[in-house]
Amino acid sequence: MIKAIYIYDAPDAIGLDIGVIAQYLSELLPDTQVQTRTDFFTYHIGQFDLELTDALTEQVVVRLDEREVHNLVAPDRRGDLPPVAPEDEDLPTVYQAEQLQDVMRAMLPQDERGDEHLHIVYITQCIGHFEPGEPYLTLQIIQHGQPTIISTTGFVEVPALPREYSFRRAQLLSFGMDEAVEELDERFAERALAHGDTRITRVAIGYALHALFQRLFGESGCDEPSCPLRHARTHDELIEAHLSENSGLCDHHTRMLIEARGEKGAR
């Protein structure tokens, strides 16, 4: 079983409440210590002596800059495709997920490493990887491992939007009908998560469950539409899995968790 879970805040993620996430996990795993922390780098750099923090901060900034993706085109396709910067796609800073994880892992203290410790790091930056054969970087919501990284921007940018919404929005934008676009956004608000959405914490809890089940059982997916462990490919699937009235761990995954806790009771 996991001895301790550390949850790191993403201060720029509007509406994210890691206290609620911590409370949920504490109730789910009553024998596990769940601790909330400020954002990852601020917290860990702050554990060093004051005279070292400036030098360490400078080193971290350099390492992060080296791992930032400035061109979303796959390296092996840059000879025949024009460059695409993240800002061209209205994206914030983008990192290669594994490389960002490497920087973070090096900062974890020895006594907080190992399978009994789960670090869940929420960030607003995007993460992704270059999939073999794909011409552009593939964005992702979660990078499992130590620490586990969850991009709140990924909640919005990774799942596909409803086709009808995307088609109509593109049409309206091409005609410069900005007011109509705003009305369209409001009409589809219940079918898609948006930046600054007040429902972000509920989705963040779902992906914390992904991190938990991956660590405990080596799996995080589910075929049940209303189980938050489902890998949501579209916003409709995301809403069903995390925000619908039926959303909740399916019977299969509930039993797995009960057995892991050594309990015989119901959910």
Image (cartoon, grey):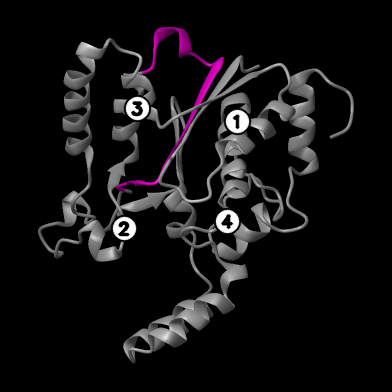
Q: Which residue is mark 4?
A: 198
Q: Which residue is mark 2?
A: 91
- The region drawn magenta spans 108-130
Type of residue at label 2?
A: Leu
Q: Is residue 125 magenta?
A: yes
Q: Residue furthest top?
A: 111
Ranked by sequence position, the earlier of labels 2 and 3 is 3
Q: In percent of the image, x 24 and y 60: which residue is there?
A: 87
Taking depth in this image into account, of 115 and 59 the one nearest to the observer is: 59
Kindly check if marks 1 and 3 are in contact, taking CB atoms under 8 A apart as contact: no
Type of residue at label 1?
A: Leu
Kindly check if marks 2 and 3 are in contact, taking CB atoms under 8 A apart as contact: no
Ranked by sequence position, the earlier of labels 4 and 3 is 3
Ranked by sequence position, the earlier of labels 1 and 2 is 2
Q: Is residue 61 magenta?
A: no
Type of residue at label 3?
A: Thr
Q: Residues within 10 Å of mark 3 (few under 14, many from 20)?
A: few
Type of residue at label 4?
A: Thr
Number of the front mark, 1 or 2:
2
Q: Residue furthest front?
A: 50
Q: Is residue 99 left or right of residue 154?
A: left
Number of the front mark, 4 or 2:
4
Number of the front mark, 1 or 3:
3
Q: Which residue is mark 3?
A: 42
Q: Residues within 10 Å of mark 2 (few under 14, many from 20)?
A: some
**Alpha carbon distance from label 1 to label 4:** 23 Å
Q: Residues within 10 Å of mark 1 (few under 14, many from 20)?
A: many
- SS for dot 4: loop
